[in-house]
Amino acid sequence: MDLGLRGKKAIVTGATKGIGRAIVELFALEGVDIALCSRTQEDVETTVQELRRHNVNVFGQAVNVRDGEAYKAWLQSAASALGGCDIFIPNVSAGGGFDSEKNWTKNFEVDVLHTVRGCETLMPHLEKSSAGSIVIIASTNAVETFGVPQAFNAMKAALITYAKQLAQHVGKKGVRVNSVSPGPIYFEGGSWELIKGTMPKLYDYALRQIPCGRMGTPEEVARIVAFVASPAGSLMAGSNVVADNGFTKRVQF
């Protein structure tokens, strides 16, 4: 199936590792021009060089998304470098943690504000696109209780609600907004690799909740994100797609 992505322009945050890295790799293979960022310039430069092998235009810079003004300036530079923006994937997350109030501030600034600022800054560009699309990366931690109370879980839940309401608000302007909620995703350097080494009982418990007995991969999530973001997914707006290999147990009507 042709996703209709060739020639599109995508901006992806947190795109040098894990799910974000898999997303930009797949986009590049589909002929999408890409702007990406992460916190480390060396990682950005490496990723940019690797993606350019697919003969697409790639723009990358290191940026701290908690610095609102610097982040918004980068978004405008990215859209300018690409000549517009058809797809926005806000992927950066502060991750989990429940040891202090600082986690709530960090997750709010990184997960929520970075997404909202990105959507607001890029909306004029997305409105000009014939296939404007935003896919917010949420989490199954937002739709079902798991572990201990964490800012990460609550902020991802806020993003699902934000995506739904934003979809209603900007749909009339031709921009689709959806969210994708991955379950446990295992990759080298990721949180589940850390949990496996430091909290093996939690890792084993999570693994037992997955019917087929394996966690997902970043590449599997990327394929779902690519479809939802693409013109092939044109009927999807305001949806939250759970991508968890059966990890969650709720019935979603």
Image (cartoon, rainbow, N blue to C red):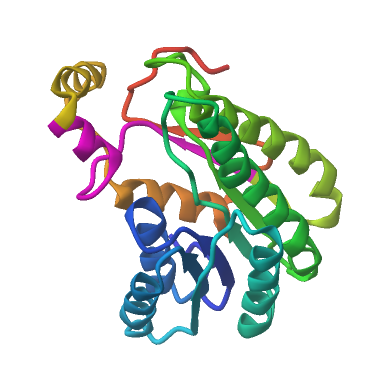
Q: On the rendered structure, is 99 left or right of 120?
A: left
User: In percent of the image, x 14 and y 23: which residue is there?
Assistant: 200
> How many marks can you see?
0
Is 228 covered by the magenta stretch?
no
Q: Is residue 235 visible?
A: no
Is residue 163 depicted above or below 74 in this figure?
Answer: above
192 vs 146: above or below: below
| Residue 97 lies in quadrant | top left
Q: In which quadrant of the rendered image does the N terminus lie?
A: bottom left
Magenta-span inclusion, residue 196? yes
Give the residue drawn at x 39%, y 19%.
248
**Which residue is at a point 76% across and 69% down the rendered structure image?**
125
Q: Is residue 226 visible?
A: yes
Residue 19: % across, % down: 37, 51
Give x and y (percent) for residue 137: 52, 44
Name the quarter where the C terminus is drawn: top right
Q: Position of residue 179 (x, y in %)?
A: 57, 40
Q: Which corner quadrant of the image does residue 130 belong to?
A: bottom right
- Measuring from the top left, give residue 76's x and y in whole percent: 70, 74
The answer to whether 188 is drawn above or below residue 57 in the figure is: above
Identify the residue at image location x=22%, y=31%. Answer: 195
61 sits to left or right of 188: right
From which residue to which does the magenta span run? 178-197
The residue lying toward the viewer, choosing from 230 and 25, is 25
